[in-house]
Image (tube, grey):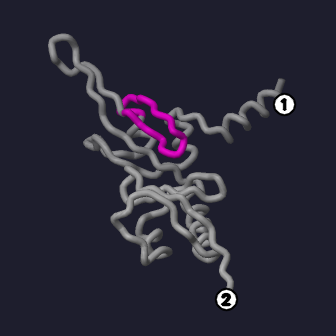
């Protein structure tokens, strides 16, 4: 039996519970429990490297990546408090990082909580948001920017 094998580059990420894998030239995030289900004999102490995958394993990774990438966007947020020269807190912002875009923004807490539904006591964490929420937060997505540019040209 001749099985064709592919090389998959993987890395355990700071995004808790996920592996970053490169599939067909695109980075995708795979939950670690599914990654280990596909590669059950992999040493779990290895945090990055390459692994040989059969066609079945590779297709399973591609399928999981498609499901994970479908209008779900992972953001990481933390509260940043600014202090005046006397040491008193004077400004608070959420610092929000869209992991797959590689962009970071600062946004006022009221707007962040209204858009995402985060609890007022939440100071840091991760969450999944939709594309519409990502746009409302102020991130720039290539597909939305291209559509807006096309619409502007058509309306002119």
Q: Is residue 54 above or below residue 146?
A: below
Q: Residue at x 52, y 32 (%)?
A: 138
- The part of the chain drawn in magenta is 95-111
Is residue 131 located in the magenta-colored stretch of the structure? Answer: no
Which residue in the structure is indicated by mark 1?
154
Disc 1, disc 2: CB below 8 Å?
A: no
Q: Is residue 5 above or below residue 128?
A: below
- Looking at marks 1 and 2 on the same chain, the residue that comes earlier in the sequence is marked by 2
- Tell me the quarter of the picture where residue 59 sits: bottom right
- Tell me the quarter of the picture where residue 88 sits: top left
Question: 16 or 156, which is in the foreground?
Answer: 16
How far across and down, in percent of the image, does residue 24 sit?
66, 57
Q: Residue at x 60, y 70 (%)?
A: 58
Q: Quadrant of the C terminus?
A: top right
Residue at disc 1, secondary structure: helix
How far across and down, in percent of the image, does residue 87 sit?
16, 17
Residue extending farthest to the top is: 85
Label drawn at residue 1: 2
How far across and down, in percent of the image, does residue 147 sit?
73, 37
Alpha-carbon span between mark 1 and mark 2: 56 Å
**Disc number lying in front (1 or 2):** 2
How far across and down, in percent of the image, does residue 18 sit?
42, 59
Crowd band around label 2 with a 10 angstrom C-alpha radius: few (<14), some (14–19), many (20+): few
Question: 73 or 122, which is in the foreground?
Answer: 73
């Amino acid at each position: 039996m001749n099985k064709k094998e592919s090389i998959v580059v993987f890395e355990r990420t700071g995004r808790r519970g996920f592996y970053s894998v490169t599939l067909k030239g695109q980075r995708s995030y795979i939950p670690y429990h599914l990654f280990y289900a596909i590669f059950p004999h992999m040493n779990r102490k290895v945090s990055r490297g390459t692994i040989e995958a059969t066609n079945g394993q590779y297709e399973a990774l591609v399928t999981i990546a498609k499901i994970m990438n479908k209008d779900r966007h992972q953001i990481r947020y933390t509260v940043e408090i600014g202090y005046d020269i006397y040491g008193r807190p004077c400004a608070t912002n959420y610092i929000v990082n869209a992991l797959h875009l590689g962009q970071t923004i600062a946004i006022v807490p009221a707007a962040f909580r209204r858009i995402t539904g985060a609890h007022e006591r939440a100071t840091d964490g991760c969450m999944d948001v939709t594309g519409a929420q990502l746009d409302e937060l102020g991130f720039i997505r290539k597909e939305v920017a291209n559509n807006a540019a096309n619409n502007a040209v058509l309306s002119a």
